[in-house]
Image (cartoon, rainbow, N blue to C red):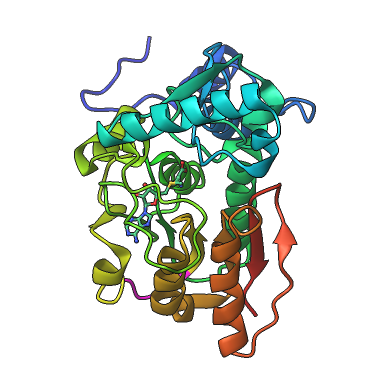
Amino acid sequence: MRRLQPGAGPTLPTIITLAFLFLLSSPMPTDPNPDEPAAIDLYLELMAKTLAASIYDESAWSVLNYGRPGWKGLRHPRRFASALFKYFLGQMAAKRSTILVKQWGFKEPERKDGRDFPFIGYTMIGLRRLENIRFCTEEVLRHKVPGDLIETGVWRGGTTIFMRALLQAHGVTDRKVWVADSFQGLPATSGDGDDWDLSRNDYFKVSLAEVKANFAKFGLLDGQVEFLPGWFCDTLPSAPITRLAVLRLDGDLYSSTMDALKNLYHKVSPGGYVIVDDYQSWASCRRAVTEFLDGLGLKPEIKTIDQDGVYWRKE
Ligand SMILES: C[S@@+](CC[C@H](N)C(=O)[O-])C[C@H]1O[C@@H](n2cnc3c(N)ncnc32)[C@H](O)[C@@H]1O
């Protein structure tokens, strides 16, 4: 019998036998099933549904904004009395920083289009506008358009959380998400033709600490997220942003839209996307966009997302 020399390694037949046994014991790799959604789609779809609160069987609600009773009401005494009552009720509530809300049953199509206000959601823009953010972000990643992502007007942060999730899902580590908001609601309107003054509406007031906590709940609060707390007119001119690939505006008002365009549009890379949340539903927001583009002599192809939002690709 051959005696092994001290320090001698295993022989070639032993190595081949061991390798054969190892291969036999390893699980065979399975081909991905083309009919099954990829993990990345599953993650992003679940994120979108969670952020928009459309997986919860919660009731939706909308803020009641009782204006002055109109002439129509005057012709019907009962309707006029009811409108007058609601008007004074609304005024009294507003004076006490209280908002009146009406509860609605949860309706999936409404949440999809962002037409109601989620009670526990992290974004009010709905699933279609979230899908549009995914489309724009994946386009700039695919075409290597340089720059970060920003939303001006974030409320509870849901849209920017989704932007950060998109970077995470695609393994992008060299782009940031900028989160710009007063974190104390909307400013008062100042004769720019805005239809509503929402400055006293507490529903829109979400603190910086709360938004940061929301990012943390999804494990997405890290060095790739930058916050710009304050009024846009103060923060955006000096924001240390070099280049943007996606610019999303959701500050509603004429001044908020114009401040964002004036300070950020020139930073959007060619091939990057500009998204305006309130273009179709807020006349003065649309006017700000039109005046800004006209001033630069630009006529981009503006595409509709839903009843509120639009977007275009910067040439
Ligand atoms: C309609 S909410 C944004 C909704 C949000 N994008 C979402 O995904 O649900 C409007 C936000 O814009 C902010 N905002 C509006 N005008 C602003 C301004 N001039 N400066 C800073 N924040 C502003 C408000 O504080 C509020 O959070």
Residue 94 spot, x, y in % from top left? 33, 35
Instruction: Name the quadrant containing residue 33.
Output: top right
Q: In this view, does 226 lie to the left or right of 314?
A: left
The stretch of residues the image draws in magenta is: 240-244
Query: Count of labels shown?
Result: 0
Q: Can residue 128 be seen in this view?
A: yes
Q: Is residue 56 found inside the magenta-colored segment of the image? A: no
**Residue at 58% across, 56% down:** 282
Q: Is residue 274 visible?
A: no
Q: Which residue lies furthest to the right in this view?
A: 35
Residue 115 spot, x, y in % from top left? 62, 35
**Residue at 47% across, 36% down:** 123
Tell me if residue 225 comes above or below residue 218 in the rendering. below
Instruction: Name the quadrant containing residue 23.
Output: top right
The majority secondary structure of the magenta stretch comes to loop
Q: Quadrant of the N terminus?
A: top left
Instruction: Name the quadrant containing residue 165.
Output: top left
Q: In which quarter of the image is the C terminus?
A: bottom right
Tell me if residue 213 comes above or below residue 314 in the rendering. above
Residue 188 spot, x, y in % from top left? 33, 57
**Residue at 47% across, 25% down:** 85
Q: In this view, does 37 lie to the left or right of 207?
A: right
**Residue at 58% across, 42% down:** 130
Q: In this view, does 171 lie to the left or right of 110?
A: left
Residue 176 spot, x, y in % from top left? 36, 58
In front here: 193 or 11? 193
In front here: 199 or 76? 76
Tell me if residue 98 comes above or below residue 292 in the rendering. above
In front here: 197 or 267? 197
